[in-house]
Image: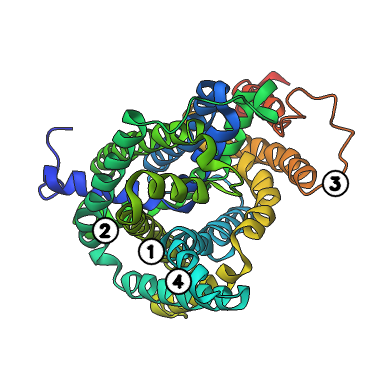
Amino acid sequence: MGHCVQNSNMSIGDTLGLGFMTFAFFLGAGNLIFPPFAGMLAGENMTLAMLGFLVTAVGLPLAGLIAVAKANGKVMAMLPAFAATALAVSIYIIIGPAFAAPRTGLVAFEIGARPFLDNAEAVIQIGALALNQAQLFYTIGFFALAMVLSLYPGKLLDSVGKVLTPILIFLLVGLAVSVIVTPSAAIGAATGDYIDSPLSKGILEGYNTMDTLASVIFGMLIIDILRKKGITESKAQTRYLVRAAIIAASGLAFVYISLFYLGATAGDIAAGAENGGQILTNYVTHEFGTMGTVLLAAVVSIACLTTAVGLITACSEYFNELLPKISYKAFVIFFSLVCATVANVGLTQLINISIPVLMTIYPVAIALVAITFLTERFARPEFSHRLVLSVALFFGIFDGLKAAGFEINFLSFMPLHSEGMAWLLPVGIAIVACLFVPAKDQAVAAS
């Protein structure tokens, strides 16, 4: 790989910037909310729960980025055109305007603005109505800023990777050190599903970050940014994308482990918390007072903003390619408006609505990543891709219905069904079976 075409080399600073930007795209809302809550619930079983969480929240996104690099950005090339488009559109809508992007604005409000309003509440008695208005104004401002940053995607690497993220990392390291040096309480007992199956519960909890879905899309976005930097050769693109992925994954693992530990040792601080955002805010206020709350507000707002920008940019670029008559900028404005609207549903409600959808689409995304790594091993790659993804979708639909509260009993005999992972075994069997399917001409010769 030494003799690349000129200008296909990036400076160390650029490579780090790319890695930091990738990290910042991933480190959004869910990544800060779910680990402390899971840590609190897992208690003494924290280690297993955390391992499970790291598998789906760090391992799979890393694999997703590398799969995109391996396929040169064309992960869905083996599927029939309509299926590939349907899958891509549904992933873009989920991580874009429907769930993940609006969630960034909500979390930024919950942690970045609400603590200050709650403090003021005692004085002026702000009612629920005023809180909703504050949320409305905040989310409008938030997505207006995200929109402005998304309108100039060429400058993303410089604005996000080199300015915003280093500030973010510095603040997160400070938080992590304090968690380890001064835990608030002893680790508590495990509760709920974390008592009997902490590992599989952790694995499912990692779905909520939506990062495996995002990795397929961020991978394409990064390849696009590399092209704009003049790196056109696919080997070089793969090399830089893999480096960026490793930097991002290391950063995420570090953040998750410290937040898990924070949740597990939160003790009384976490009493009555509805989501991880509240545990985080309570902890920081308890340890660092108002200054801490201000810093946390800054960290979370930056983390959510960078993710919102990444998501809006990726969605707008995709739909602009799909419908070239509508300009990229028009899509940016449209998606920013939709996000600001959806964001006013409320955080807990949004998470509840999104879980069944995620349980349906996640198996497909995971199967897509797995099968991309095996494409060269299949004698009939197109057939294999279609079969495996159909199996994943079939079982994913039932997992989704089950998560939505429907009684799906006819699959209950299957291993991992109760954990919401009934799809795993059939997809595994389908992949193995496809490895043994002979090529067409051999099949004819044999008959």
Q: Using the image as rendered, state which of residue 172 and residue 331 is in the foreground.
A: 172
Q: Using the image as rendered, state which of residue 43 and residue 392 is in the foreground.
A: 43
Q: Residues under labels 3 and 1: Cα distance?
A: 36 Å
Q: Are the residues flagged by discs 2 and 1 in contact, CB closer than 8 Å?
A: yes
Kindly report which numbered mark, 4 or 2, lies closer to the viewer in this rendering: 2
Q: Secondary structure at mark 1?
A: helix
Q: In this orientation, does residue 324 appear?
A: no
Left-right relation of 252 to 445: left
| Residue that numbered label 2 is attached to | 160
Location of residue 263 in the rendering, given as x and y in whole percent from the top left corner: 49, 36
Q: Give the answer, above or below, for where 139 lies relative to 362.
A: below
Q: Nearer the N terminus, badge 3 or badge 2?
A: 2
Q: Are the residues flagged by discs 4 and 3 in contact, CB closer than 8 Å?
A: no
Location of residue 111 in the rendering, given as x and y in whole percent from the top left corner: 45, 58
Kindly report which numbered mark, 4 or 3, lies closer to the viewer in this rendering: 3
Q: Nearer the N terminus, badge 2 or badge 1?
A: 2
Q: Which mark is residue 406?
A: 3
Q: Residues within 10 Å of mark 1 (few under 14, many from 20)?
A: many
| Residue that numbered label 1 is attached to | 309
Determine the residue positioned at 66% across, 29% down. Answer: 191
| Residue that numbered label 4 is attached to | 320
Report how many numbered discs are placed on residues in the image: 4
Determine the residue positioned at 41% across, 71% down. Answer: 142
